[in-house]
Amino acid sequence: MTLLRMQDVDAFYGSAQILDKVSLRVEKGDRVAVLGRNGVGKTTLINALLGIARVGAGSIEMQGQACKNIRNFDAARRGIAVVPQGRRIIANLTVKENLMLGAAPRRPGPWVLETVFDLFPILRERADTFGTALSGGQQQMLAIGRALMANPDLLILDEPSEGLAPVIVDQLTDLLNRLSSEGTSILLVEQNISFVLDVVRRYYVLSKGRVIEEGDVSGVSIDKLRQHIAV
Ligand SMILES: Nc1ncnc2c1ncn2[C@@H]1O[C@H](COP(=O)(O)OP(=O)(O)O)[C@@H](O)[C@H]1O
Ligand SMILES: [Mg+2]
């Protein structure tokens, strides 16, 4: 079953074209990475799914349904939840309120406040404090917990390791592997190659708004992948 299919997608902010014929697909059970340097259009690819960047030519399907230029929350309603770059924790909401925002699509599934609190006990302890009072690593847990509250079939994470200590990135690796083994598909947008290789099976490389390479991670040389990312 294909959860997400982008076919020859052009994406724009105003009249500025950022993505040029990008094709990508994520199947049920997939763990896929999108790699690329700063500014190549990784976040824009996600924004095209969320209706934040405008999609021109090309097509997007979520769970087999066409959905070009959809509205905010529509992706989550269709089982695709995003952990945005920089976490985007809402400053004047508590930890619990931030989590409840993620439940807005009202999709049934295993993830409710209590199971997210069981996954991240620190969030239970700090449930009534403002989300932005948390440490960076805790805010990333909150952003992931918020996305899980939508009970997604596909979890998309935009540079989740950014700004995190290596020990926290190791915890994130274990978490994503666990979620994947429990049935959540993963699309990981990253620049941290060793983290990516510990999580995904396939990858796409973006450069200047185009997919310039794709393949399986097994057998690919780390140095070759690094070349696509090092500045
Ligand atoms: N809201 C916006 N309006 C116009 N241009 C933007 C906007 N956001 C990003 N860009 C431009 O789009 C390009 C791709 O950005 P982005 O998708 O954020 O790259 P990445 O996530 O790979 O670092 C960059 O040149 C950036 O300056
Ligand atoms: Mg980005």
Image (spheres, rainbow, N blue to C red):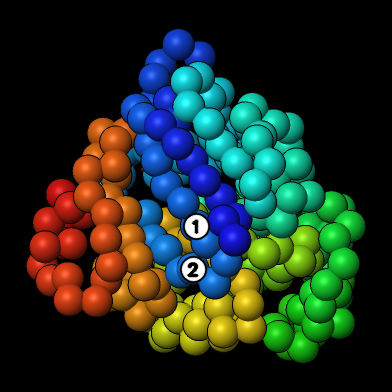
206 left or right of 13? left
Identify the disc placed on residue 221: none
Classify residue 136 by image quadrant: bottom right
Position above or below: 220 against 42: below
Q: Quadrant of the N terminus?
A: bottom right
11 left or right of 100? left
Badge 2: how crowded within 10 Å, few (<14), some, or many (20+)? many
Q: CA distance from mark 2 to mark 1?
A: 6 Å
Position above or below: 201 against 203: below
Whether residue 164 is visible here, answered yes or no, is: yes
Q: Percent position (x, y) of residue 125?
A: 79, 84
Position above or below: 148 against 13: below
Amino acid type indicated by mark 2 = Asp
Of 64 and 222, the residue lying toward us: 64
Classify residue 95 by image quadrant: bottom right
**Which residue is label 1 attached to?**
26
**Which residue is label 2 attached to?**
30
Amino acid type indicated by mark 1 = Val
215 left or right of 186? left
| Callout 1: SS | strand
Point 73% across, 32% down: residue: 71
Point 43% across, 25% down: residue: 10
Instruction: Check if mark 2's residue and mark 1's residue have beta carbons within 8 Å.
Output: yes
Q: Percent position (x, y) of residue 220?
A: 17, 70
Position above or below: 167 against 191: below
Q: Percent position (x, y) of residue 106?
A: 89, 57
